[in-house]
Image (cartoon, rainbow, N blue to C red):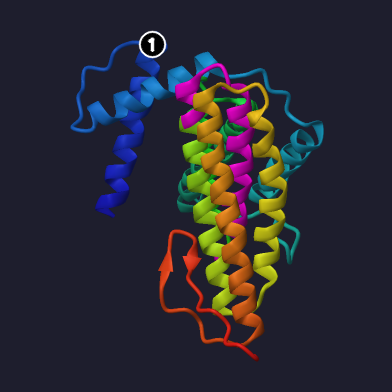
Amino acid sequence: MDSDLFSRRRAVRFAQLLDEANGGPRHHVRSRADAQLTALVAVGRRLVAERPVVEVDAEFRAGLRAMLVAAADRDDAADPVTGAAPKTTARGALLGGVTARRARARGAILVGIAAGAVAVSGISAASENAVPGDALYGMKRSTERAQLALASSDVSRGQLFLDFARTRLDEAATLRDDPTGFSAVLDDMDTDTRQGVRLLTTAATQHADPAALDAVNAFVAGQRRAVGGLLDGAGSAERDRTRQSLALLDTIRRRSDALRAAITCALPAPVGSDALGPTPAACPLGR
């Protein structure tokens, strides 16, 4: 109860600060949470100032409208058995007023959530092509972290990391005139690659199933060709840094092949591991 009250007070104070930031009258009250809420107001104003032009899909708009209308109809519906409108007493009128206010509040919250979802999805879509240094690049990386948090399994997370490594490669291709930025993005690419490979190789050995290794090999084959393309026209420093990423991909392919061999000859799951996952023993001769 106390937690609900505190949250409600924070929400009211946040609304007041938003109102003041948009030119509304000042409220002569202060809260211990003002510093944190003011920072959130600043973030909100920045998102509004930098929001892209977003066109809401007509089908989504129609579906949202239908959902809101259906919710309103349920609140106003007659008795489902008799078909009669509910009887109104003094107490019922009072409770009805409270219920109506709550229904309106729920409707407002629903509309707010829907509008927020539309805005955030629009910003996320606009951030897809952002590169380091762009205003929306932080949103792009935050979206990736959210995808990881929502992934249903280690295999799914591993495949997401490999997808992010491909994305980092695309970013690196746009930063070839910026040696520092180019190297930093390749560092992030290699980090995503290692994390994805570690999750997939671990899953393969735990289940003695090489299917996850097929995903690793397919990634290495395509990624190696694409990374090799960065060597064309690159300067000396960029070529050296690119070769490091190529060497990592070659190491991953060798690890994948060794794990596949260990699974094929039914070796026990490896005990040791490193940044690329389990480190398998060699398959004995004759097995």
Query: For the point 80% across and 31% down, which residue is it?
Result: 58
Please say whether residue 156 is one of the residues in the magenta stretch: yes
> What kind of residue is marked 1?
Gly
Q: Residue furthest front?
A: 285
Query: For the point 18% across and 32% down, which residue is it?
Result: 32
Please say whether residue 236 is one of the residues in the magenta stretch: no
Residue under label 1, please give it: 24
Residue range of the region highlighted in magenta in the rendering: 154-183
x and y, in percent, of residue 160 in the image: 60, 51
Q: Quadrant of the C terminus?
A: bottom right
Query: For the point 59% across and 44% down, which residue is it?
Result: 246
| Residue 116 in view here | yes
In the image, taking residue 131 as reference, residue 39 lies left or right, namely: left
Q: Is residue 73 above or below residue 33?
A: below
Image-quadrant location for residue 271 = bottom left
Q: Residues within 10 Å of mark 1 (few under 14, many from 20)?
A: few
x and y, in percent, of residue 204 in the image: 60, 73
Q: Residue furthest right?
A: 59
| Residue 149 in view here | no
What is the secondary structure assignment of the residue under circle 1? loop
x and y, in percent, of residue 239 in the image: 56, 30
Image-quadrant location for residue 217 = bottom right
In the image, taking residue 54 as reference, residue 139 lies left or right, namely: left
In front: 58, or 102?
58
Q: Is residue 173 above or below residue 23?
A: below
Query: For the point 41% across and 24% down, which residue is it?
Result: 43
Q: Residue furthest bottom?
A: 286
Characterize the magenta stretch by its predominant secondary structure. helix
